[in-house]
Amino acid sequence: MQALVTGIRWLLVPVSAVAVIAASVVAGRAAVALADRRCPTESLIGGSCVEPWHTSVVEAAIYGAVAVCVAGLVILPARIAPQLQRTVAVLLFLAAVGCAGAAFVLTGWADLLRPLLVAVPVGALALWWVWSRRPAR
């Protein structure tokens, strides 16, 4: 029975990572859609809001979604893993930050630097949190 539970928990590690990514994308898109709906119709030009506050709100939603995604990718699968929690956390930290870094380096888009600058410290903080906890036996 213990082997079955252990196997199920290992199967749930990648499922939880995908769920974190999906939830972060949905939450970020919902926040951006809410900001779009709050824009007055006279401030819509070509379907885009030109209010000064709109850009800041959209960027905050994006950075918030990145932070939640990276923290969730480090913490949740590590908590679900039956053993090697620290290893799982490090691997997913490297994957999350590596994807953000690769997107920035490969595209050269300066706009992708700020999400990377959010992902690194949030991921490091989440990694520290996982490492500071006593590993499960």
Image: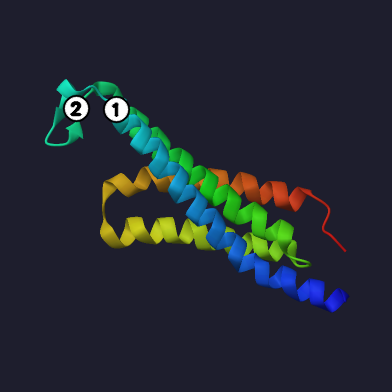
> On the rendered structure, is 47 left or right of 117?
left
Tag 2 residue: 50
Tag 1 residue: 54
Report whether residue 118 is seen.
Answer: no
- Locate residue 73: give its quadrant: bottom right
> On the rendered structure, is 129 left or right of 45?
right
Quarter holding the N terminus is bottom right
Amino acid on which disc 2 is placed: Val
Amino acid on which disc 1 is placed: His
Q: Are marks 2 and 1 in contact (CB under 8 Å)?
A: yes
- Locate residue 88: give its quadrant: bottom right
Question: Which residue is rendered at x = 43% and y = 40% of the image?
Answer: 63
What kind of element bears circle 2?
loop
> On the rendered structure, is 33 left or right of 87?
left
Q: Nearer the viewer, residue 65 or 124?
A: 65
> Which colour scheme appears in the figure?
rainbow
- For residue 106, the mark is none
Question: Which residue is rendered at x = 70% and y = 71% of the image?
Answer: 10
Whole-angstrom CA distance, mark 2 to mark 1, is 7 Å
Q: Nearer the viewer, residue 61 or 103?
A: 61
Quarter holding the C terminus is bottom right
Depicted 28 relative to depicted 88: above or below? above
Report whether residue 71 is seen.
Answer: yes
How far from the left and from the top, in percent, is residue 29? 39, 44
What kind of element bears circle 1?
helix
> Few, some or many C-alpha atoms within 10 Å of disc 2 (few <14, some 14-19, many ≥20)?
some
How far from the left and from the top, in percent, is residue 94? 54, 61
How far from the left and from the top, in percent, is residue 25? 44, 50
> Few, some or many C-alpha atoms within 10 Å of disc 1 (few <14, some 14-19, many ≥20)?
some
Question: Which residue is rendered at x = 35% and y = 59% of the image?
Answer: 103
Depicted 82 relative to depicted 43: above or below? below
How far from the left and from the top, in percent, is residue 36? 29, 32
